[in-house]
Image (spheres, rainbow, N blue to C red):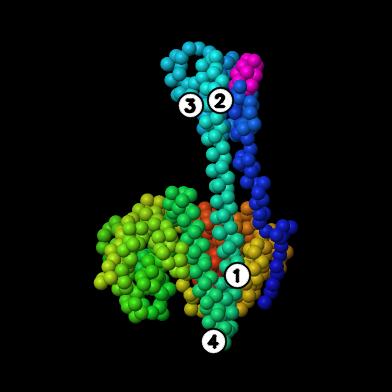
């Protein structure tokens, strides 16, 4: 076994956002009111009318000066005189609407002329929200300004909430799933060594509880994505639905309830395989859990239609309680917190909707419960994956011959590195470890080893992405180094395409991780 742990000059990993960071975007700053008029006395008069401690007043004597201020500051309201030399108020407003930063700044025009309908319409066309006519009434001016200042404060508060939410999602996605990866990997390794029954039982409980916690974290992340983006993002790719279902059957093999599979017609199409696996695993899991011991659960796939698959998941257990039926697909609908968060069926429905399908159920105590899904065979956003090995690591089959190799681990979490190293050395591999991309690069440049593959975290310190590091390593090695990318973050839709790679979310299932490694090593051996 070889071992090399490298750290860059920043061994502590990611920078933790401090409270001051959240004020940097505007929350906590006074709203800014901009007054634009070519007469200094008018600027002084309006500033005097509005002066208070609730907002900042900034003045400009020309349109050009106003543009400089607008590009520098976040302005809550612009009060602009219509009649100015060189650039009048209408021209300034037109320029503001052409720049992203100033496009939505509210504009109130000020004019000394009597109301002219045609000119007022022109003002509204270039983006005005209101007009003021000289001489200006102080109470009217203050009341209008107060409205927009209040709206700006509310906008800043919403931005603050979004920043806090992003931090919360980041904590869930990375800071909690990384320790879980270490716990599950260590438990799995210990199970292979444990001989005492009580010891093995305790390790099984750790593994099951860790898996349950991982699913709960993923459900909370999914709920956040749905609420933030108006639905789940999906990544359709060509797939064989029968293969997905057979993998579900393998997952539930050995349970007390028997799973019966029934296929009819064409099973080919394009779906987000990860999400479909999540959908079926949840529905079948619920059906098994709520079935009497030894009862059959059936999963039927009808592919006779050219455009749709019809999917039925049925069990013979007691029906869904009547109190839950109307809200079964709503978040937190389940009343049993011991079994989960009550988000599973809500997320199932969102997965189906994201594919353009529909889901419904029927249930009674006599016949059990049936979930019926209509799923389009091809989604509008179908695309072929830009990788040689399919991105869904579940599709990787265990090769008949086990192979050993030199594996480079790149992860900034020392517990993840250590647990993966222990697991892989137990499997017979030589392991090198690095805390970030620079450290991994030094291992290659110094010629200490030529790895057969790399296992790398997607999110590395200082905003570096794992796939970019892999590309750098491939250039140094001058060959297509296989890569297994582990992600503890929620941005699945933002995954960077990478040839000759596979992806597993943290905490990664140990068996699938080992199977994926064996697949890569077998392919490398065939090419050599």
Question: In terms of depth relative to the viewer, which is nearer, 134 or 263?
Answer: 134
Q: Residues within 10 Å of mark 1 (few under 14, many from 20)?
A: many
Q: Which residue is mark 1?
A: 182
Question: In terms of depth relative to the viewer, which is nearer, 457 or 407?
Answer: 457
Mark 1 or 2, nearer chain start? 2
SS at badge 2:
helix
Tag in front: 3 or 1: 3
Question: In terms of depth relative to the viewer, which is nearer, 303 or 491?
Answer: 491
How far is mark 3 from mark 2, CA to CA? 15 Å
Question: In terms of depth relative to the viewer, which is nearer, 257 or 381?
Answer: 257
Q: Residue shown at 49%/54% (left/top)?
A: 224
| Residue 361 on image: x %, y % | 30, 62
SS at badge 3:
strand
Q: Which residue is mark 3?
A: 129
Q: Residue shown at 63%/46% (left/top)?
A: 22
Q: Main secondary structure of the magenta part?
A: helix
Q: Which residue is mark 4?
A: 197
How far is mark 1 from mark 2, CA to CA? 59 Å
- Answer whether labels 1 and 2 touch (C-beta < 8 Å): no
Mark 3 or 1, nearer chain start? 3
Query: Quarter of the image containing the C terminus?
Result: bottom right
How far is mark 2 from mark 4, CA to CA? 77 Å
* Position of 448 relative to 144 (above/below): below
Is residue 301 visible to us here?
no
Tag in front: 2 or 4: 2
Q: Residue shown at 44%/14% (left/top)?
A: 116
Task: Provide the residue span drawn in magenta.
Answer: 36-48
Tag in front: 3 or 2: 2
Q: Residue furthest top?
A: 113
SS at badge 1:
helix
Q: Which residue is mark 2?
A: 142
């Amino acid at each position: 076994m070889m071992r090399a742990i490298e750290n860059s000059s920043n061994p502590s990993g990611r920078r933790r956002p401090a409270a001051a960071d959240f004020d940097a975007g505007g929350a906590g700053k006074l709203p800014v009111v901009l007054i634009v008029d070519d007469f200094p006395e008018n600027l002084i008069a309006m500033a005097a009318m509005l002066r208070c401690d609730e907002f900042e007043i900034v003045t400009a004597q020309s349109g050009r000066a106003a543009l400089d201020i607008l590009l520098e500051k976040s302005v809550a309201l612009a009060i602009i005189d219509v009649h100015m030399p060189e650039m009048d108020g209408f021209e300034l407003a037109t320029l503001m609407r052409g720049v992203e930063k100033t496009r939505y700044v509210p504009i109130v025009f000020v004019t000394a002329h009597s109301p002219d309908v045609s000119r007022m319409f022109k003002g509204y066309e270039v983006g005005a929200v209101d007009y003021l006519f000289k001489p200006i009434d102080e109470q009217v001016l203050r009341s209008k300004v107060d409205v927009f200042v209040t709206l700006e404060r509310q906008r800043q508060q919403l931005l603050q909430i979004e920043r806090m939410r992003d931090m919360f999602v980041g904590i869930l996605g990375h800071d909690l799933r990384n320790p879980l990866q270490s716990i599950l990997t260590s438990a799995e390794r210990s199970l292979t060594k444990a001989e005492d029954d009580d010891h093995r039982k305790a390790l099984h409980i750790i593994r099951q509880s860790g898996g349950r916690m991982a699913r709960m974290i993923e459900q909370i992340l999914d709920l956040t994505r749905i609420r933030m983006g108006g639905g789940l993002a999906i990544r359709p790719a060509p797939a064989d639905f029968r293969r997905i279902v057979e993998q579900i059957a393998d997952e539930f093999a050995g349970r007390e309830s028997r799973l019966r599979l029934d296929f009819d017609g064409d099973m080919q199409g394009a779906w987000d395989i990860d999400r479909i696996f999540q959908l079926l695993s949840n529905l079948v899991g619920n059906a098994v859990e709520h079935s009497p011991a030894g009862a059959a659960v059936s999963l039927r796939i009808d592919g006779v239609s050219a455009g749709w698959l019809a999917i039925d998941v049925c069990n013979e257990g007691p029906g869904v309680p009547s109190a839950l039926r109307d809200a079964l697909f709503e978040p937190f609908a389940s009343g049993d917190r011991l079994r989960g968060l009550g988000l599973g069926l809500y997320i199932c429905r969102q997965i189906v909707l994201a594919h353009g399908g529909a889901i419904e159920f029927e249930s009674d105590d006599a016949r059990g419960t049936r979930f019926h899904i209509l799923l389009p065979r091809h989604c509008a956003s179908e695309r072929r994956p830009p990788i040689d090995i399919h991105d869904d690591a579940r599709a990787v089959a265990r090769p008949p011959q086990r192979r050993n190799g030199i594996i480079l681990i790149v992860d900034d979490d020392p517990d993840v590195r250590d647990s993966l190293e222990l697991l892989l050395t137990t499997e017979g591999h030589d392991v090198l470890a690095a805390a970030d991309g620079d450290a991994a690069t030094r291992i290659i440049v110094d010629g200490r080893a030529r790895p057969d593959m790399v296992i790398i975290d997607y999110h590395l310190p200082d905003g570096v992405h794992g796939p970019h590091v892999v590309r750098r390593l491939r250039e140094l090695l001058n060959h297509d180094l296989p890569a297994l990318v582990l992600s503890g973050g929620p941005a699945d839709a933002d995954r960077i395409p990478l040839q000759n790679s596979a992806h597993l979310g943290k905490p990664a299932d140990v068996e699938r991780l080992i199977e994926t490694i064996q697949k890569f090593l077998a392919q490398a051996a065939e090419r050599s």
